[in-house]
Image (spheres, rainbow, N blue to C red):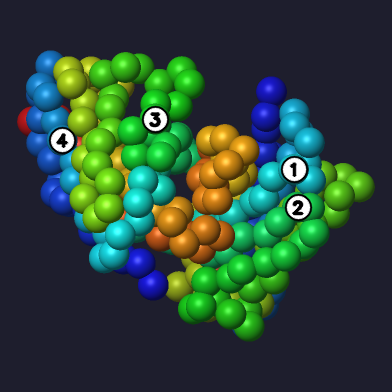
Amino acid sequence: QVQLVQSGAEVKKPGASVKVSCKASGYTFTSYGITWVRQAPGQGLEWMGWISANNGNTNYAQKLQGRVTMTTDTSTSTVYMELRSLRSDDTAVYYCARVTFSNYYDSSGYNDYWGQGTLVTVSS
Amino acid sequence: DIQMTQSPSTLSASVGDRVTITCRASQSISSWLAWFQQKPGKAPKLLIYKASSLESGVPSRFSGSGSGTEFTLTISSLQPDDFATYYCQQYNSYPVYTFGQGTKLEVK
């Protein structure tokens, strides 16, 4: 069965960096992209970016450009999201989610499976 | 960027009610819309994709409709397990996505 298992909770100081991992299993890793979504306490879902597990291509949310980097390790079927220069408003639960297509001819994909979430707390 | 606006933000209803949540896009997104259910402390769960396709394993009381800029999620007969927050997501601009702000479905 498809599973996305994320790394554990992190506590960081302002200005530091955090790297969250998302280990995939139960499917062919390089056949699906991954998006990262975050959710601040009591708030809605915010798309952060996308990475192709096939070739490493990325697309990041404009507001995070320059602070976020997404990478893959195909040898371990793991996707990483690194966020730098952390601020208090980066405190959130971070989710990875697989991108799938409803059929071969579709040009756009949606999120089907999600990781369990990783709480990142930024506090001095 | 495509903006997604959900209404209402909060919906009070009772078990057995038929409820409808609306999602509007700032420009046409064809049928590239998904609906998710989220419960406290849990990851979102996919309910509907491509505006009206029911995800495998999701009860048939959930249905989606719409195309272009206006979409609806309907729960035909509300069950106790359905009280949660619901989000729409556009993927017309794949691989760039946008979520609606969410609709909290609460007990009346």
Q: Secondary structure at mark 1?
A: helix
Residue A41's x, y, as percent?
Answer: 39, 57
Measured Cα–Cα span from mark 4 to mark 3: 16 Å
Q: Is residue B60 above or below residue A71?
A: above
Q: Give whichever of A105, B19 is nearer the camera.
A: A105
Q: Give whichever of A11, A17 is nearer the camera.
A: A17
The chain to which mark 2 is attached is A
Q: What residue lies at 58% left-to-right and 64% top-to-bottom?
A: A49
Quarter in which the N terminus of chain B is drawn? bottom left
Residue B101's x, y, as percent?
Answer: 29, 56
Measured Cα–Cα span from mark 2 to mark 3: 26 Å
| Residue beneath disc 2 | A53
Foreground mark, 4 or 1, reads: 1
Residue A5's x, y, as percent?
Answer: 69, 39
The reply to whether callout 1 and callout 2 are in contact (CB within 8 Å) is: yes
To which quarter of the image does residue B37 belong?
top left
| Residue beneath disc 1 | A31
User: Disc 1 residue type?
Assistant: Ser
- Of marks 1 and 2, which one's residue comes earlier in the chain? 1
- Of marks 4 and 3, which one's residue comes earlier in the chain? 4
User: Disc 4 residue type?
Assistant: Thr
| Residue beneath disc 4 | B20
Q: Secondary structure at mark 4?
A: strand
Q: What residue lies at 40% left-to-right and 21% top-to-bottom?
A: B58
Q: Give whichever of B69, B102 is nearer the camera.
A: B69
Quarter in which the C terminus of chain B is drawn? top left
Measured Cα–Cα span from mark 4 to mark 2: 37 Å
Q: Residue furthest front?
A: A105
User: Disc 2 residue type?
Assistant: Ala
Q: What residue lies at 30% left-to-right and 41% top-to-bottom?
A: B86
Tell me, yes or no, if residue A120 can be seen here: no
Measured Cα–Cα span from mark 3 to mark 1: 22 Å
